[in-house]
Image: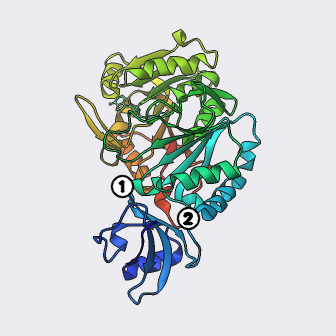
Amino acid sequence: MRQEISLTVTDKAKAEFQRGMPLISKEALENADSLITEGAIVSLVDKQGKFLAKGYYGKQNKGYGWVLTRNKDEAIGQGFIERTLTAAIAERQNFFRNPNTTAFRVFNGEGDGFGGLAIDYYDGYYLLSWYSEGVYTFKDEVVEALQNVADFKGIYQKKRFDTKGQYIEEDDFVAGERGEFPLIVKENGVNFAVYLNDGAMTGIFLDQRDVRNAIKEKYAKGKTVLNTFSYTGAFSVAAALGGAEKTTSVDLAKRSSAKTIEQFSVNGIDYENQDILVMDVFNYFKYAKRKELKFDLVVLDPPSFARSKKYTFSTAKDYTSLMKEAIAITEKQGTIVASTNNASFGMKKFKGFIDKAFQEEGKKYRIVEEFTLPSDFRVRKEFKEGDYLKVLFVELV
Ligand code: SAH
């Protein structure tokens, strides 16, 4: 049986929960230290003991758990999960019907009513991502529910919480039939090779779909493109298919080179006409400056935090200096695609980082386009941090 407990919330948090706040943060709780089992059902009550909301306990970097319902009598079980999943699938009917895009998010955590769980669709396969031990206790119910409400070939999973080193031995396959990898999915007609059974990442970040499409359709034609922190080169592929003169992809990870070759190849692009470099982006900036290389389009999509042999980088602290490096190697009237997925700051602050970089460089710019999460990554207006993606197309003037 699942543990069920009552937790008292602060007066400030009470007002937030009444407005629809889905996150149960540590600060919201009066008695956060009481011993709670992961996956326990928690009833949030005010200081007078009045019921506010019901959720589950699951520790992740964002907080202590998530609100699931504000109805005191609603049971959290198979039925609840089936209703939630059905609604999420219904929301994505336009995606399911689109033959040109076969990979997208079906269920986006708290945006779809169950924080800590994300479900992505990859051409007939569902990939479950569990963000805490607590949410993982719902695995049997979620898998059962998915089997009842969705058509699929197979189900895979990723545990995105600390499993204390047990990750590697485990198989990511859950149910149905096994896929053959790479699985080739489509995004706005572009092919991507994905792996659902090979470590934490699949080969493509689905939340950048609209940005890749904009690069392909509007920004790439005839341009020289530098893609930094390029991972599998997804932005480079979009640019090449959009008619870029040449793309240069730079990533530190050794495997990024083979992965990028693969993404070009599944799109019929000769990778030998593109540059794919395994190196530290910060060293590349130095090299490019020394060689006086300049690009028409520069993509900056760093991880929130990175440490290499020589440099430590955090988007919250160092985006301005990263942007300055990019400005230095961008052609006059060129464009920089500045992206971050750091949820700890919002668009306004991000624009501040960009502005500061141009001020310090004594240069002028214009923001020509702005992106946040695409529509399948559903977010709640009561929880702004959920809309973590910020992408600015910045033109030098
Ligand atoms: N832009 C990519 C996703 C980037 S993921 C896409 O759209 O698919 C972050 C990548 O940054 C990882 O592949 C990691 O290897 C790389 N990385 C981290 N620090 C780096 C550094 N200092 N230099 C180059 N690459 C780095």
Looking at this view, name the residue that lies furthest to the top: 272
Ligand 1 in which quarter? top left
Q: Quick check: 306 above or below 92?
A: above
Q: Residue at x 47, y 52 (%)?
A: 388
Q: Earlier in the sequence, mark 1 or mark 2?
A: 1
Disc 1 packing (10 Å; few <14; some 14–19; many ≥20):
few
Amino acid of disc 2: Lys
Q: Which residue is mark 2?
A: 381
Q: Secondary structure at mark 1?
A: loop
Amino acid of disc 1: Asn
Residue 243 position in % (x across, y down): 63, 21
| Residue 69 picture quarter | bottom right
| Residue 362 picture quarter | top left
Q: Residue at x 32, y 25 (%)?
A: 280
Q: CA distance from mark 1 to mark 2?
A: 20 Å
User: Which of the two residues, 193 or 329, is positioned nearer the viewer here?
Assistant: 193
Q: Quick check: 127 above or below 244?
A: below
Q: Which residue is mark 1?
A: 61
Residue 313 position in % (x across, y down): 29, 39
Residue 22 position in % (x across, y down): 49, 67
- On the question of residue 347 being in view, the answer is no
- On the question of residue 242 being in view, the answer is yes
Residue 217 position in % (x across, y down): 66, 32
Mark in the foreground, 1 or 2: 1
Q: Is residue 292 left or right of residue 332?
A: left
Q: Secondary structure at mark 2?
A: loop
